[in-house]
Image (cartoon, rainbow, N blue to C red):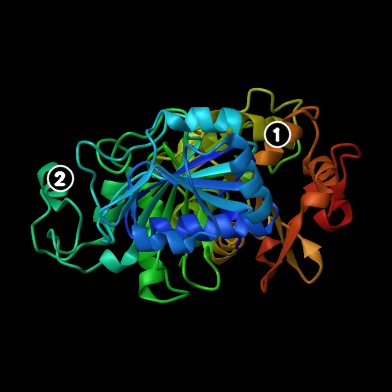
Amino acid sequence: MKLEHAFDLNRGEVVSFIGAGGKTSLLVSMGYELAEAGWRVLATTSTHLAEEQLGFFPRTLRSDADANAISQALSENQFVLLYDEIRAGRVYGPPLSWAKQLLDRVDSDILLVEADDAAGLPFKAPLASEPRIPSETTLVVSVSSLSALGAPLNAEHVYNPAAMIEKYGFVENSPVKSPWLAQVIRDEELGLQGVPDDARVLVYLNQTPERGYVRGRARLIARLSLQSKRISAVALGSVRGAEPVREVQRPIGALVLAAADAQSASPPTLLQPGERGAATLAQVTEKVFRSRIDHVRVITGRGASATRKAIHHLGVKIEHNRAWKTGGFVSALRTGLQSLPDHVAAIIVIPGDQARLQPKTIYQLLTQYARGEGDFLIPRYRGRSGYPVLIGQRHWLDILKLPSHFGFTAIAEQCAESITYLNVDSDCVLRRVESPHTRRPLSLTSSV
């Protein structure tokens, strides 16, 4: 996956790199990728670089150079590093206040800033004076390397371990564990120290392998890091690999529809006993929990009291669609979206009567989404489409503009060009939905 896509970069951004374990390499890789795509890329540091690292950049200039000279260098090279001075083998950047002046006078598309120091170590907690992030920053990229896992927690292997030990009671010289990385990364006084309030935060876990145990550890770190509402995404990759980002984990929500609208399954269907005597709705909800989705909501409508009683023991959050009598899928979706935290990036929607649902199918949807292979995903078995579906945040506003009584058919028709299909090997995804216009059973296949 390209860095531009994984980091959701836009022209005009100021991107500050903090943390440890690959900041400079990531900045340089991003600069070359964007330059190749035609962007005019400026880079600098608010701390320092090693003098030999100047060779990483196609062009370097003093930051006090004339604006026209900087613009000309961008036209000729696309990617330019600006620095203040070179002293004792170190390249120092200009003052933090300089960033705004630069943005006002130079016609660049993006500014990349190395805003932290880690002395070449893979994992860090900041000192009191770190990091040095310009206030104009729109995106903060927090870097950590998975090579820190299993290393002794001491100053030889970790930057400023004393801060971690003092805050969390980690044992000095004990092997660094996956949850420790997540705790430090998401901590407001450690990994998020000095981050501007209005900046997006994305974590980059460097040296993530293609598969195996450590890949699993990376996903655990991502899930734990995303418990912070400040962190919008966690990218897993290897900056020096052929593919710098292998997947991007984001906060996901799930809406389980329990008689949530006029066209959905009736309470008797939802409450009929299945495996181990549990109600179908309870079985479906448990399968969603097993998929490790943190933000789960059950949306009720007709027979709300009975459905609540059937899933009370699960401790799941329940939201009632007050417009269920006249509403359709859109009204149920609106109720669910209003109940989710603002930082949730996508939702999985599951009918509460889909008893044959397999957690494997949810995992396949989440994996395809994490790999950047679509953000409106519908599973399909032998050419027939079904549920659950995954819908990314960028589609929500357009969907919610539709009349409340519209069903999924209308949504699928409106978003047809954005839909990506996931071929699955089980018919567990198949069920019937109802047309919002004809009120007759309609296969998803005929509407998308």
Is residue 274 among the parts visible in the rendering? Answer: no
Choose between 63 and 322: the one closer to the eye. 63
Q: Residue at x 82, y 45 (%)?
A: 409
Crowd class of label 1 (few under 14; some 14 to 19; many from 20; radius 10 Å): many
SS for dot 2: helix
Q: Is residue 272 above or below residue 299?
A: below
Residue 261, label in figure: 1
Q: Is residue 158 above or below residue 112?
A: below
**Place of residue 303 in the rendered image (x, y in percent of width and height, measured from the top left):** 60, 32
**Place of residue 46 in the rendered image (x, y in percent of width and height, measured from the top left):** 37, 41
56 relative position to 96: left or right: right
Q: Kindly identify the amino acid type of the residue bearing the numbered disc 1.
A: Asp
Choose between 142 and 254: the one closer to the eye. 142
Q: Residue at x 87, y 39 (%)?
A: 439
Choose between 189 and 315: the one closer to the eye. 189
Residue topped by disc 2: 163
Choose between 369 and 426: the one closer to the eye. 369
Residue 277, label in figure: none
Q: Kindly identify the amino acid type of the residue bearing the numbered disc 2.
A: Ala
Q: Are marks 1 and 2 in contact (CB under 8 Å)?
A: no
- Residue pushed farthest right? 438
Is residue 96 among the parts visible in the rendering? Answer: yes
